[in-house]
Image (cartoon, rainbow, N blue to C red):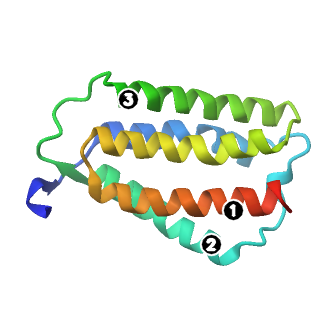
Amino acid sequence: MFKKYKFGFDFWALLLFFLIMIPNFIWFAIPAPNDILRADSVTTVIDIIASICQVLMIITLCAIINKAKGRLTLSPLIIIAVVCCLLYFTSWFFYYMGITNAIIILGMTFFPCFTFLLFAIDRKNMIAVIPISIFMVCHLIYGIVNFVIH
């Protein structure tokens, strides 16, 4: 399996990461009204696992290349990833409008993860799928436990 991969640099993966992080950078600088995300988390162990997997996700997306990936094109997976990214930005927009219901919170947790997952699958980077999947599960647990059922 590892024979299909090489170390390299995927510019598009890094660009995607920074694109997904834009709302977070804004949130760090400018608090939202009704900013429930600044509350203390009750899922600290899950959060630590998520943070580790997030770092591994970015490293594997950016530094591990499948030799058979080809050029980035507007494949169905990439189109769906773009839609997920737009839905993520839309969730942040509504969050900044003061709406903090379960749909918005789930949109802010699910869509960025699914965007990364679709990108990795499109790029044939199954190594990155592992930390992305773990991060996605942890991120969803964090969002659901801290803000939907709590």
Q: Which residue is mark 3?
A: 78
Real-space Cα separation, disc 2 to disc 1, in angstroms: 7 Å
Look at the numbered discs 2 and 1 and tell me whether their residues touch, using CB distance below 8 Å.
yes
Amino acid type shown at disc 1: Tyr
Q: Name the residue furthest right.
A: 34
Real-space Cα separation, disc 1 to disc 3, in angstroms: 26 Å
Answer left or right for 125 relative to 136.
left
Identify the residue shown where x is 8% and y is 60%: 3
Q: Is residue 50 above or below residue 112?
A: below
Q: What label does residue 61 carry, if any?
A: none
Answer left or right for 150 relative to 24.
right
Q: Which residue is mark 2?
A: 46
Tell me the crowding category of disc 3: few under 14, some 14 to 19, or many 20 or more residues within 10 angstroms, Cα based: many
Amino acid type shown at disc 3: Ile
Residue 133: image quadrant is bottom left
Identify the residue shown where x is 70% and y is 45%: 106
Describe the element under mark 3 as helix, strand or loop.
helix
Q: What label does residue 142 carry, if any?
A: 1
Amino acid type shown at disc 2: Ile
Describe the element under mark 2 as helix, strand or loop.
helix
Q: Quadrant of the C terminus?
A: bottom right
Tell me the crowding category of disc 2: few under 14, some 14 to 19, or many 20 or more residues within 10 angstroms, Cα based: some
